[in-house]
Image: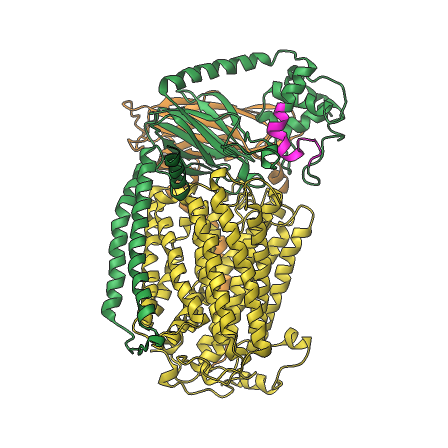
Chain colours: A green, B yellow, C orange
Amino acid sequence: MGLGLAAAARADELNMTPGVTQISRSIYDLHMVIFWICVAIGVVVFGVMFWSIFQHRKSRGAQAASFHESTRLEIAWTLIPILILIGMAFPATQTLVAMYDTGGEDMAVEVRGYQWKWQYKYLDEDYNSTFSFFSNLATSRDEIENRVVKNDNYLLEVDEPLRIPANRKVRFLITSEDVIHAWWVPDFGIKRDAIPGMLNELWTVVETPGVYRGQCTELCGMDHGFMPIVVEVMAEEDYDAWYADRVRMEEARHEALSKTFTPAELMEEGERVYATFCASCHQANGKGLPPVFPALAGSPIATGPLSDHLDIIVNGRAGTSMNAFGNQLDAAEIAAVTHYERNAWGNDVGDVTQPIDVIEFMSGKEAEETP
Amino acid sequence: MSEAVLTHHDDHHHGPASGITRWLFTTNHKDIGTLYLWFSFLMLLIGGAMALVIRTELFQPGLQFVEPAFFNQMTTNHGLIMVFGAIMPAFVGLANWLLPMMVGAPDMALPRMNNLSFWILPFAFGMLISTLFMEGGGPNFGWTFYAPLSTTYAPDTVTYFIFGVHLMGASSIMGSINIIATILNMRAPGMTLMKMPLFVWTWLITAYLLLAVMPVLAGAVTMMLFDIHFGTSFFNAAGGGDPVLFQHIFWFFGHPEVYIMILPAFGVVSQIIPTFARKPLFGYDSMVYATASIAFLSFIVWAHHMFTVGMPLAGQLFFMYATMLIAVPTGVKVFNWVSTMWRGSMTFETPMLFAIAFVVLFTIGGFSGLMLAIAPADYQYHDTYFVVAHFHYVLVPGALFSIIAAVYYWLPKWCGRMYDETLGKVHFWLSFIGVNVTFFPQHFSGLAGMPRRIPDYALQFADFNMVSSVGAFIFGFSQLVFLYVVIKAIRSGRPATDRVWEGAHGLEWTLPSPAPYHSFTTPPTVTEAEAHS
Amino acid sequence: MHKSSKGIVWKLGLMVVGMFGFGFALVPLYDLLCEVTGLGGRTGGPYAYDPAVVEVDRSRLVKVNLLTNTNDGMPWRFWSEVGGMRVHPGEAKDVKFYVKNTTDRRMVGQAVPSVVPITATDYFHKTECFCFESQVLEPGEEMELPLRFIVDAGLPKNVQTISLSYALFDATGFAAAE
């Protein structure tokens, strides 16, 4: 059993995955056919060559012949490869046509690439957005920096996976916030670039529930290697239950926006938000990576007036990597992270930022006050 | 010989000037060829050092040696330096040394421009490399520099990078004009086009490719420059541009560029194999036609680099079929080389070993290329280590091996001394083992799903990455053996004969070894024995 | 055999200049290609709609899905009144979008449209669209943006859903440059 598993793992490391969809299996078959064609041609060509190398060597007394052309041979080795290629083009075309059959989907998810995370927006039947979330790398800095043992899903784990139902046609609408990313799940046999300002589409029908992992495959800047894709395919009824739950949770979150939190709750939530959204640039210790990513510990913004601090978090800073988080986080999260930044790493402003402060700021109250 | 060439040679010294001015002001094709070759070797070492930084970081999962931001600068500069600094100038260096001697000309057609096209390069690469030490770091957007990562999101040093690319382009363009003028105008009487050695043919076609696409690259970086500094929006969606347009323009340059790096290699191998098989090249005519067809096809396949970008089915199919078609003329070349060896009387000196390794390993790179051409399968290969393995097989044991083979083959003619055959073979076997240990496992990590250009990876890729890193160090350090062999040959090698190799044919072998500073000041007669066909 | 190189240098120099120009010519050529093939999800410019001529296909309902996003850290809020709707091919539909400038400075926004599937781009017409021009918003200002579109009756039968995405970019820099 153990041996079998080990062997299976080896095969996994050696070849393309056949995957869990019709498309991924067709791709795998194409891959194997073209591979064996190459092997066969290689055996013939290299076979002739090595036979010649061993037989026709001067040290064995071989005399050089003087022939140097043959139109018949040239025609033969032009035509035969063309025929092989035509034979190969048929199944490849079929698979490609099948991949372009995008219609008749059961549900749709918008997939948006960000530096350096994925956002999934679930759309209901009428394509109204129901809820959305970011899927961030969940591997700890300690594992990346070799301070603790790496777990089996090192770099391929996220805080919240994309969840889709099995046996339903899911349509992915792919785009990007900033630079070009690419969304790839090898087991589904689908990969498409996420391009800012442009919409791309993909679809899949997965037959087997399970967890499938992939990565961003287009160089997208510093943390390109740290934005994995995890898709949890659930049995249909499980998915429906989860979906209903998630929609309810979303409603609860909206209610939370009017709540008042204790400083301790804000610090705890703020630390989580900070670690997820801010720490890759500004670092967990708040010291940043100057000059590109400024320190927050002791910074004039994080220890200055609240409105300036909220402004930079909500609206970002044009021309830098600082995103406008007003479009990524809700008011409760912004409040928590703002509070955290003002009261962590020796910053002791001591004020308390509540969701309502953020909502008021975003509704333009602060904006009107500033000349 | 024309009036202009005559006057030029009359007011010229009949031997090299002494000291540094010889190299700074030289208009001699042999001196300039030497400069190009040493420069490209220096770039090979610098680009190689960057590759070793990359492989060191990838030796184990986890971040150990460099930060991801610096890692990206390493992959970017490694690519740029190897492509534009090592491979291309090395071929131009070979062209400089060999083309005049092969076609029976006294020098290149445009000697002063020749000097300029070389001396631009140190400035171009000095500028590129200096960005690594500037605030914000050097280019970090990959050698393909896709917008908007290379425009809106680029470090400030991108402007230096753009200027550097402009200079490299200018150098290549001038070099190509010179090469075409030399081949078309300077041939000795009787050296008809279809008698030219294949190296000359492949360079003629390559030079035309360069003239066709280097200006397009210059256009692309100019548009980037305008987008970054002058508020245009060629590639910026916010102003009505399109980032995908950048990829189309880039690959319109980029795909012919791939052939620019491999066609002269075909030429080199087509010179070496007949020599050591002691048998004329099989299918000379079809080799010429195959080279021309590859060059033509290279202009209509660019979008196969962009299968995942999202294009209409018809476009996808067109680029898939056109790409598959390239396998045909490439196959013709391989079959012709094998037929040249067939029933020859072969010996296996170092140049021949590198040439045979070229045929085998380049073909493996060609096979993976054919696999990548299959668009549906490309969705699984695209931007993984499978692609990294593919183009390194084509460029390292392909282009680079052919350059090394050429150096071993013609070095005795250049410096009049033989290299140490035993050490040459040690260099070959170390390189051969190193290159395969480095790049073969990358096929596996790619198929298993490892994306390219990542500084850290999941645990299932660990074994093959470790092997690959070990191979990279073997390969990298074995190039120091090469350096030693070359220096040893120049300083104390045993004198070479004029013909050097028993089976060598061609005008360059009719000259004394070392080739005199000015050769063929009167045009030679082209005999059947020294001509192809 | 040796000829003067002047002639050939001129010819090759012209080729270089020509190819440099060709690089730039690729920009309009690419635009043309995009309009013809729908590459990049382009939908073409304004479209004249005459309800008297266009016949509405009542037998079919096509889902039209509207996506709104802000890009490159654009801080404005941007949303549509509905996420999607069902339309009969041939009928004109109106839908409202909204933007709000949440910052304390005057800004210019530009919405960039994109449509999938690519086969549908030729059949998706806009007679009125805020994407034809950029929007200038004062601090705190909110604006209603109208869109009127028609799905062509010739839409291939296998297309049941069309997704139209708008990406809102900060074009303040471009407006200042003009």
Q: In this view, does A286 lie to the left or right of B494?
A: right
Front residue of this view, candidates B423 and B283: B423
- Quarter of the image for the N terminus of chain A: give it: top left
Instruction: Determine whether B512 is above or below B476 in the image.
Output: below
Residue A130 on image: x %, y %: 47, 19
Front residue of this view, candidates A292 and B318: A292
Magenta stretch bounds? A272-288
Front residue of this view, candidates A103 and B64: B64
- Quarter of the image for the C terminus of chain A: give it: top right
Residue A326 on image: x %, y %: 60, 25
Q: Does the magenta stretch include residue A158?
A: no
Residue B56 on image: x %, y %: 57, 49
Residue drawn at x 32%, y 64% as measured from the top left: B332
Instruction: Determine whether A59 is above or below A110 in the image.
Output: below
Q: Is the magenta stretch mostly helix, strand or loop?
A: helix
Quarter of the image for residue B63 reads: top right
Q: Does the magenta stretch include residue A277?
A: yes
Residue B84 on image: x %, y %: 54, 60
Q: In this view, does C158 lie to the left or right of C146?
A: left
Instruction: Determine whether B25 is above or below B157 in the image.
Output: below
